[in-house]
Amino acid sequence: MRLPHGYDLPLPAYQTAHAAGADLLAAVPDDAPLTIAPGSRALVPTGIAIALPVGTEAQVRPRSGLAVKHGLTVLNAPGTIDADYRGEVQVLLVNHGGDPVVVTRGMRIAQMIVAPVLQMVLREVASLDETARGAGGFGSTGG
Ligand SMILES: O=c1ccn([C@H]2C[C@H](O)[C@@H](COP(=O)(O)OP(=O)(O)OP(=O)(O)O)O2)c(=O)[nH]1
């Protein structure tokens, strides 16, 4: 689904045949680009909402090019889009560079990866002795 302010933008797309992530576009207004000052963060709209298959998530990850060129990355990377979330996908950008970064409409700001999810079913035990391994770690096998 495209939200009203995202209508004229292309949908996120894979840039190569086997790319893991589809690039997310900034859906800031044409006449109101967003300037992110050094050390600041901004929640950037993408104009899209998605319905993921049950048993999957989408991860919002940084684009390496923006990180190396501008110090721009995703603050909460990887951002988690839950399968039952139906709101707008947003990208929390942070500017770790020394110069302000201007985010314009349609700029490829991050990438979205769909991945499988397993939910835990936790079972409480009274003691670690009930488990085959116990608490051994940090070289306990002699390595
Ligand atoms: O980078 C992100 C991360 C999350 N979300 C949306 C989708 C996700 O399903 C929802 C909640 O995210 P999360 O569980 O990480 O946030 P929370 O702080 O635990 O919020 P909530 O209390 O709403 O679960 O916000 C985004 O649009 N972009």
Image (spheres, rainbow, N blue to C red):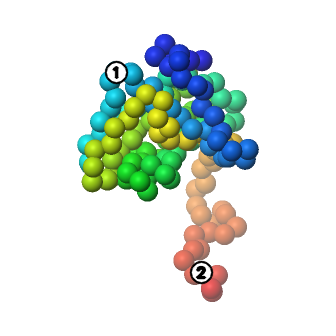
Q: Which mark is residue 31?
A: 1
Q: Is residue 7 left or right of residue 30?
A: right
Q: Earlier in the sequence, mark 1 or mark 2?
A: 1
Residue found at the very far right of the displayed protein: 17
Q: Amino acid at mark 1?
A: Asp
Can you see residue 96? yes
User: Foreground residue, 83 or 23?
Assistant: 23
Q: Residues within 10 Å of mark 2 (few under 14, many from 20)?
A: few
Q: Is residue 124 left or right of residue 4?
A: right
Q: CA distance from mark 1 to mark 2?
A: 61 Å
Residue beneath the point at 27% across and 54% down: 98
Residue 111's x, y, as percent? Answer: 55, 41
Q: Which mark is residue 140?
A: 2
Residue beneath the point at 65% across and 39% down: 14
- Determine whether 58 is above or below 52 in the image: below
Residue found at the very far top of the displayed protein: 4
Q: Which mark is residue 101?
A: none
**Ligand 1 within 8 A of label 2's CB?**
no
